[in-house]
Amino acid sequence: MSNERVTVIRFSPARNTYEKCVYNLPSLHNATILQTLQYINEELDPTLAFRYGCRYNHCGLCGVMVDGKPRLACRVNLDGANEIAPLANLPLLRDLVVDRSAYFKTLLGLKLYPQNINSEPLGRLQENPLHKNLMHCLECLCCVASCPKYSFADGNVGNPYVYVKLAQLHLDPRDQADRVSQARTLEKKKCQDCMQCVCPNGIHLRKALEIF
Amino acid sequence: MAAVAAVEAGARVAIVCKEPIGYGNTRMAVGLTACAGLPGDSREAFLDDVTVSGEGLCTRELVETLVDDSRAALTKLEEFGHMFNRDHHGVLSREALSRAGGHSLARTLSSSGAGVGLAQSLRAAVEKYHLSFFEDTLTLSLIQTEGVIRGISALSLADGEEFLLGAKAVVLATGGGGWLFYPQTSNNRGTVGDGYALAFRAGAKLMDMEQVQLIPFAITHPEAYRGLICGEPVVAGPLGIIYDSEGRTVLGPGINNLTRSAVVRAMAGAIREGRAGEHGGLTLDLRPNLEKGPGYRDKLRATGIFDAVLVAYGRKAYNWEEPWSIMPTVHYFMGGIKADKDGRTTVPGLYAAGEVMGGVHGGNRLGSVALTEVLVFGLRAGRAAASHAKDTKQLLMLQTGPVVSPLFGKQGRHRPLTLCRKLQKSMWTLAGLVREEAQLQRALEVIEEISREARDVSIPAETVYNTELRDWVELDFMLETARLVVTSALLRKESRGAHLRSDFPDRGGHGWERNIILFRGENGLVENNLEEAGHE
């Protein structure tokens, strides 16, 4: 670890506030943010809660804000970073743990699966190159955390992740639903002149958003 | 899959999941899925590949089911929204297929969404089929009366509430137990063997728990990525070579035609002889494959199977222009709950599907059949469980008091996480790559020691997402599963499949073509018997 102090912003459900905790770390070489959190939890503070799954870029569970930018903790090194915080804009359970269940429940009703498929499964199908890219979405929700227009607390639904899901379906030749109209009802127009969302995994957010 | 099949059969269903739905091991797969009935393949060839690879321990009926139901199961997955890759004409021709590790033919489909795409489709099915679900919820035990399943007890991590859920049938689809060997595993952090422990405690029989598959090529350093997969035999290509630390050949050209267990066996021999390098691994040199151009490399790279090489070893290694340091890593439990082709266990009302069940793969699993297995047996177990529920009268569950909630705020001498790490280290060093009587006996002692220490733990009072409490529950399952793995490893006094014994280095005769069956005896002790393999 190249720096010796890191601040972790922790959400406290009991007080419904954020608390700052500063940890002093030994110098360990090339530690990832995830290793840093594991070190804090194993050696310094057993109470720190965070999620992780696969340890490298497959599950999307370890998203956090690093110095204000959404990152996958398994993918980036601490490298001079000062502050680790929970993903912005999303409901939280505790510390760095996003309440993914509560978030995904807000999407029930969008019918995010191909509707009225009229082709043979495993039959002839041409996959759009952009669809191939969009299917790599890890659902880490970092794009949602980077969106200046979305907040779970405001009760709205439209955000970059949702538009990626709708773009996947729009580009899926099997899906017969009108995803363009659906995106527009979710106030997609807010994205015009914004496009500040980012993806840590190379999903073409801009191209997906431009569909609508 | 099981939940959808059960709903389609008319049952009322709820999914209980430790993580958000779809965030388990399936998500981490590269998405390679074997399927029967594709051009140039035959049923017999597929059956033979699975059976030969299993080294005499497969259950024939389960292998037949895996093969015969595979196409229908993959069809179902595409109905959920998953999309397998076609050729450039949009057809599932031979061009769209690959030959995964240990298969004699190309019969494996890929998908641009890989495991994440598959997991997304499964979660989409929750909405499509109006399934009820409990996420971030740990299953603590199976509730029974007179030996019959009545439901489960569970703990919601989101609020710390413990509750009972009545059910006339329960399908365990909890995956394997690779996390017992962390960091020497490719598995997800939640893969702690919950299902084995739950089933064992409910009185179910388990089989061949010693058969823990290692995948031969994993990252050795840096520590952040240790144990993560960077390939299986097919990645070695026709010309790849494995060297020891002094440059002597461990395995020469043709590694791509060997099974995972054959490659691991050769590597384990060299490592045991002290021929490993700085980070405990051997060296894989893929450069000879580039003599015929980058085509082979690029096709494999597109699957993402060696993505971890880029971050761990850098661009040149990722381009196969310099060798990699490699070490086998725990990947998959072939053994598991004994079940028939409908996932029916030896306990009425209890079903199992996927990695948690045993018998399909025997001593070694081929590449790309695990996802097929999940889909095939998920569907069958769901249908069978629904049918069982229809024919069963709902009885009131026994009221049981809270089990883990009283632990909130407990003061003790040990941390659950520290005990987990101690167990994992012991499992890898004493019961990991190569096993031997004295070390396995020592492993049992360590397991008992940690079991005692686990009664004297500190748990914070925090009720919302208390990770220490989760660690304690998972430690309890890990200890039970470790006990089963080590007991079975002691009983198999030969080397077969993934199970390597330095004190019994050869495969035993036909007399050893038996499944080691474990079950709960008096006072919770592990009892065993041997059953002739091949039959249900």
Image (cartoon, coloured by chain):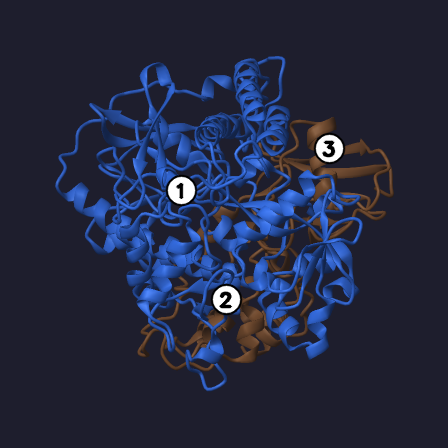
Chain colours: A brown, B blue
> Pointer 1 indicates a residue of which chain?
B
Label annotation for residue A40: 3
Distance from label 1 to label 3 (Cα)? 33 Å
Distance from label 1 to label 2 (Cα)? 31 Å
- Kindly identify the residue that appears in the image at 27 percent across and 54 percent down: B5
Residue B276 vs B322, above or below: the answer is above
State the image coordinates of residue A70 (x, y, percent, origin top left): 69, 54
The answer to whether the residues at label 1 and label 3 have Cβ atoms under 8 Å apart is no
Q: Secondary structure at mark 3?
A: helix
Residue B534 vs A130, above or below: the answer is above
Disc 1 vs disc 2: which is toward the camera? 1
Amino acid beneath label 2: Lys
Which residue in the structure is indicated by mark 2? A165
Distance from label 2 to label 3 (Cα)? 35 Å
Which residue in the structure is indicated by mark 1? B356
State the residue lying farthest toward the bottom: B89
Q: Secondary structure at mark 1?
A: helix
Q: Secondary structure at mark 2?
A: helix
Residue B322 visible to the viewer: yes
- Kindly identify the residue that appears in the image at 50 percent across and 26 percent down: B479
Label annotation for residue B36: none
